[in-house]
Amino acid sequence: MPEEEGESLIHVAIEAEELFAIGPLHFTNSMVGALLTSVVLGLAAWYITRRSTLVPGRLQSALELPVELLTGIISESSSRWRGYAGLILGFFLIILIANWIGLLPGVGTIGITHIDPTGHEAVIPIVRPASADLNFTLGLAIVAFVMFIYWGIKANGARGYLKELMGEPLYMAPLMFPINLISELSRLISLSMRLFGNVFAGEVLLATMLALAPILIPAVFLGLEILFGFVQALVFALLAMTYIATAIAEHHTTDHDDDHGEADAAHADHAPAAGAAAA
């Protein structure tokens, strides 16, 4: 009995748990978290577009501060930063709100009681942090993956992008192409797993602390999770920005080298002509 009571104190599932189904559509508690995140961002966008003033108040300043700070960082990444600034800001905001919603009272603790396959009574939380679901983080990583490939092709062209994957010299392509391809795909895995792992670990830590000491100690870890939620959103956004900026920077570096080569060739052609004129 003591072991069973101890085991029932903590309930953390790796997979998002199904709340109900409508035909082939299965709705999970992480979907509720994602929906709440969308509602919060929608209300914030409505407030900024309808109620913003030239001299911002406290709420407007609080909403604009993270956007202004991140925009300043993005603007230093490349000359084409305006093309992907909205995407990076979107990543940051949706992950940040999803992380912080998971810290609200009742999230992960208030739920529906059911009997699990082992015969024990368990609770399915109604709301689960969206970023603690691998499907959510993988979806964001796929969007980021598609976009930095898009920018790589846009900067280099499809032929230039394939040439980058094959590497130099060309006879090394059978070896370098699989390596470079795996390197590209590893970005997809690292983006999704890093975010999921850190947020899920924080969820487990809070659940454990609440079970062991439900009054004072969890408040300390709650403050840390607020900071970690911000950091994880920032890391994901900056990594996606770095991947895109790197693809653009490689193209500009190639063009810059070609321009120098053309200038040197023109100077070399001009030098004999100037010497002949002087003679």
Image (tube, rainbow, N blue to C red):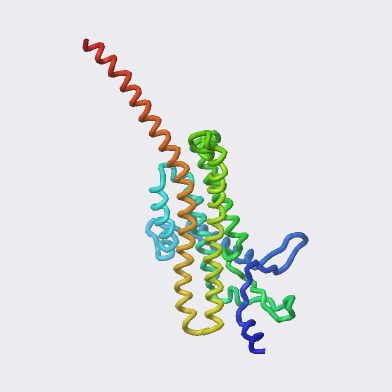
Identify which residue, 29 or 265, lies in the foreground. 265
Query: In the shown orientation, is residue 279 left or right of residue 230?
Result: left
1 shown above or below 100 = below
**Residue 22, picture quadrant:** bottom right
273 shown above or below 135 = above
- How many marks on residues? 0
Quadrant of the frame with the C terminus: top left
- Residue at left 55%, top 65%? 197
Q: Position of residue 175 (x, y in %)?
A: 55, 41
60 shown above or below 104 = above
Q: Position of residue 159 (x, y in %)?
A: 54, 33
Asked if residue 106 shows in the view, the reply is yes
- Residue at left 39%, top 60%? 56
Q: Residue furthest left?
A: 278
- Residue at left 42%, top 37%? 252
Identify which residue, 40 or 233, lies in the foreground. 233
Q: Position of residue 196 (x, y in %)?
A: 56, 63
Asked if residue 50 shows in the view, the reply is no
